[in-house]
Each structure stands twice: as C-alpha cells, then as structure tokens.
Image (cartoon, rainbow, N blue to C red):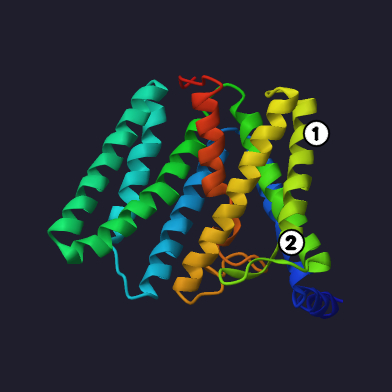
Amino acid sequence: MYKFMYKLWNKLLEHEIVTRIIFGILLIIIFGGAMTFRYPSLVHFLILAGAIGLNFEYYALLAKRKIFLWRSMLGVPILILISLPYLGLALHRTLLVVAGLLLILLVLFLIGQFFLKDLLAKVEFYLLHFVWIVLPTLFFFLLTHIENGKIYLSFLALIVASNDIFAYFVGKTWGRHKLAVKISPKKTIEGSLAGLIGGGGLGFLINYFFPVFGSYEVLFISGLIIISAQIGDLLASHFKRLSKAKDSGSIIPGHGGILDRLDGFLPAIWVLFGYLYLVKGVYYLL
C-alpha cells in the first residue's frame, strides 16, 4: 500500500498543474496558520525567511551573469530596517532612516557613474536590491504594526494570489494574444485581464466582509495592486531571462523559487503601503 501511494504521489507530481495546486494549498495553510496563531510573530518569521531566500536567489541570479556582490551587504540593510518597528519609532521617522540609506546608495551610484566605472556595475545592483527586496521587506513588517494590518496583509496576499491563479488558468486555456513575447512568451492578454477581473472581484468581496476601503476605492486600489503585481512578474521574468534562468530557484516544487512566488508581491506592497501612507493617512506605528 505504501509503495502504491508513493508511486501515485510521484505520478501526480509529474503534472505541473497538480504540483502547483498541491503546494499552493500548502502555502495557503502555512500563511493562514501564521495569520491565525501567534500573530504577528509567525508572520514576521515568514517575512524574514522569505527575505533571506530572496537574497540568496538574487545573488545566485547575478552570479550566473558573472556579477558577484558582497553577500553581507545584501543582508545587513534588511536586519537594520526590520528592527526599527521594535524601537517604537513613529512611522515618519522610520521612513526618514530609509530615505537616508537610499540617499547614500544614490550618492555611491553617482560617484561610480562619474569617477569609478567598475563601481557602477556593482552599486546599481545594490540599489536594485534595496528597492526591490529590502524596502518591500520593511513595508511588510510595518504593515503588521498598523491598525487593521492583519486585514491589509490578507487583502494583499489574497488578491495577488488570485491574480496569479486566474491569469495562469485562463491564459493556459483560452490565451491567444501574447502580452510580452520577448520577456515572457507564455503570458497572454486574456490571462492578464482575467487576473485583473478575478483579483478585483475578490478584493471587492473581501472588503464587503472586512470593510477597510470605500466601495469604489477598493476597486481602484485592487486594480493598482494587480497591475503592479503583473508588472513585477514581467520584471522578474526579464531579470531571470538576462541570467538565462527559467526559475529563480527550485525550493518550491511546481512553483520554482521564492522570487517566482513573490515577484508580484514586491511591487504590490509598494503600492498598498504607499496608498495607506499617502492617502489613508496611516502615519504612526501602533
């Protein structure tokens, strides 16, 4: 019986869709458990684990292009910034620290551009890492420290995930018109629209039961989040293509690496957190 079940399991995993569904459900269970039990400490652990994985995959993808970065420089900014919420700093003070670090990187970038050509190639990738991985990690941490943060985090996770699901299945079944052939040949316009409509509909439904946005406002912010997630997906595909890699890693069977699963979340958290801070007036950590 054991051998039969083992063979059946391996046979099922040979089909990409089945593998994606199985491990997608496992990821949902893990995230749901973290949101339900010992929130926010377990969520913080998942965020930090994800950031560590992203760091390794980012370094590995660049290494394939013969670009080698100082690994500790990738991890230190994350450790510094995620410690800020625990210091009880007001949100605007935390963002001032972020702005200061970003300014330092920009200055180094300009120095490299005008004086040290060899430095330029390195600094721009440190800058990309800071904007693409470090800041989203901080924003996820900050989101757990604001009022209704649990709802905002669940809202973001569910509509980005639903966008991926609708886009994948509709694009695979009915997709005919390519979205960006040179960047990601499998993505279609039909899939993209399905992700936008499906994710937006789910966002409206979530907000109906847990109202944190207005009726029209939720459609607007859902649309912005989904569009940014789809752009993030294309940017990650382009980055992997430059590194001649199909996936960013292989840690999640059927899904590839951590970046393959979080590529849409990284720009989406920029949009949601920026909207909450600039429009909704979420200024202070709670």
Image-quadrant location for residue 187? bottom right
**Disc 1 target residue:** 205
Where's residue 169, x and y in %? 79, 62
Density class for disc 1 (Cα within 10 Å; few <14, some 14-19, many ≥20) is few
Where's residue 180, x and y in %? 61, 66
In-image side of 15 versus 279 (left or right): right
In-image side of 224 versus 196 (left or right): left
Q: Would you say residue 130 is visible in this rendering?
A: yes
In-image side of 120 versus 126 (left or right): left
Image-quadrant location for residue 67? bottom left
Q: Return the mark for residue 11.
A: none
Q: Secondary structure at mark 2?
A: helix
Relative height, residue 56 to residue 266 (above, below): below
Image-quadrant location for residue 61? bottom left
User: Could you tell which of marks 1 and 2 lies nearer the N-terminus?
Assistant: 2
Relative height, residue 246 to residue 211 (above, below): below
* Residues under numbered marks 1 and 2 in contact, where contact means CB atoms less than 8 Å apart: no
Name the kind of residue labelled 2 in the image.
Answer: Tyr
**Residue at horizontal 74 percent and vertical 52 percent from the top:** 193
Q: Would you say residue 25 is visible in this rendering?
A: no
The quadrant the N terminus occupies is bottom right
Is 50 in front, or is 212? 212
Q: Return the mark for residue 168.
A: 2
